[in-house]
Image: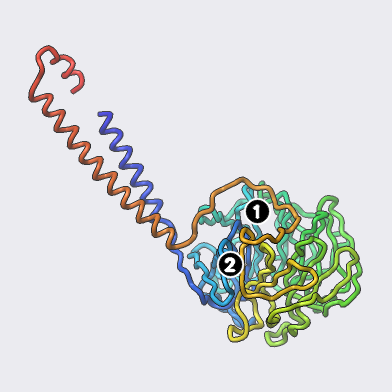
Amino acid sequence: MIFLNNLLIYIITFSALFQLLVEVKPQIVTDKPDLRYAHTATLIDDKIYMLGGGIPPRTNSIPPKETFLCLDVSTPFNTSEVNYIDILNNIVPPHRYAIAIKGGANNSTLFLYGGEVIGNQTMALVYTYDAQHDTWSVPNIIGTPPVGREFMFPVINYNGLFYMFGGSAGGVFVSDMFILDTIHFNWYKASSTFAPSNRDGYGAVFLPNKNIIYIGGFNGQSGWLPMNQVFLYDTTKDLWESKSTDGRVPSARAAFSAVLGLDAQRVIIFGGDTSATSNNFLSPEDALYFLDLNNFTWDIPKISGKIPSSRTFHRSLVIGKYMVVTFGAGYTRDEDNDILLLDISNNDEYVWTTSFVPQSLTSQPQSPIPQPSSQSITNTNTNSIGIAIGVSIGIIGGIALTVGSFFLYKQYKNRKEQRIAIPTPGNEGIRKERV
């Protein structure tokens, strides 16, 4: 009986394992997905997750076929030959103008907020995506959420607090500051005293002194907002202040990207627009600036390499020594690639390049800003080949286990029958108890 019970446990365990393996979502590798703008781009471990967006021009309301892309940045690649993983997504409706950030207790959860639905589906205000297990959920969050839903800029601090300022909803612009605790799932409203005017399309960066800097944007009444004034929000004191800037001040703009330089002493902005139409983009020479945080002076960095077209409604991330720009509107594939790489490791000269080399393979320093604390969790391999190999090994192993268990059971049964058929004198009582 013990053997039969163990056999049954083996079979049940194998069945459960096999079910888990075959339920892994298929993922397709594609090198030329649809163009997109107003998407999100979130770095989790060594992968960029790009979600949502619309197909340019902005007058279109057409979603890309691949609504959820993943780019592995743990291996070198060339921007002319990028292989994306198309993660099948049947949970989040097609949308644009949403924001996303990495947070949660383990710092491995993607939080998607807001956005404008493309089509007639209903979209939840917040979704979470567990990158380790490839699962979506709609969290139950306590408190009053923000009014703004679209065209905001995501910022998170070291303690999992997701800051959301301003934005728009149905053409109404707001200037409220709300905070989502991504660990305890609570909404909080922060102070709006001395906050910037109503706006969306601004740039925002979390600074080493735990301030958030807000730059530019668009206001329905005033239009594109000037860049000669920035706003600082102190996350530790819940206080706002404004700063005047000088130097080579960029033209008023919105829908640009902003990142912190590797030395944490400058904010780098790229792209943006100055018109609501789809054919009025910034010139390449007017696309890239940096703001010196020591004296709040703007300047244009020295640049080498092929200067790309400016773009708008894109997203930028700092990965290793690169500012990585993803998709956007304002370029064609005949001129530029979907992914742009700007080497920002040398403040004396930035370099537009087409080759990405992971941080582990270079000696360039990481940004001095600490990352939010997280527990060590092994990455789930999203490569479709790896999934196929895993499924194959699981099936083969399961079959071998089943066949081997069957023959062991037959052997056990034959020996049992032999002991019953040829009794040994003096041991009948023992045999009877075992049988």
Badge 2 density bin: few <14, some 14–19, many ≥20, Cα 10 Å = many
Cβ atoms at labels 1 and 2 below 8 Å apart: no
- In the picture, measured across the screen, residue 8 lies left or right of residue 359, that is left
Residue type for callout 1: Gly
- In the picture, measured across the screen, residue 418 lies left or right of residue 102, that is left
Q: Residue 178: which disc?
A: none
Name the residue at the front extreme: 363
Quadrant where the image shows the C terminus: top left
Marks counted in the figure total 2
Q: Please provide percent x and percent y for residue 256.
A: 73, 74
Residue highlighted by disc 2: 51
Mark pair 1, 2: CA separation: 16 Å
- Closer-to-camera residue (170/322): 322
Residue highlighted by disc 1: 103
Q: Quadrant of residue 54?
A: bottom right
Name the residue located 39 percent from the left edge and 57 percent from the top edge.
389
Name the residue located 43 percent from the left edge and 57 percent from the top edge.
24
Visible residue check, residue 173: no
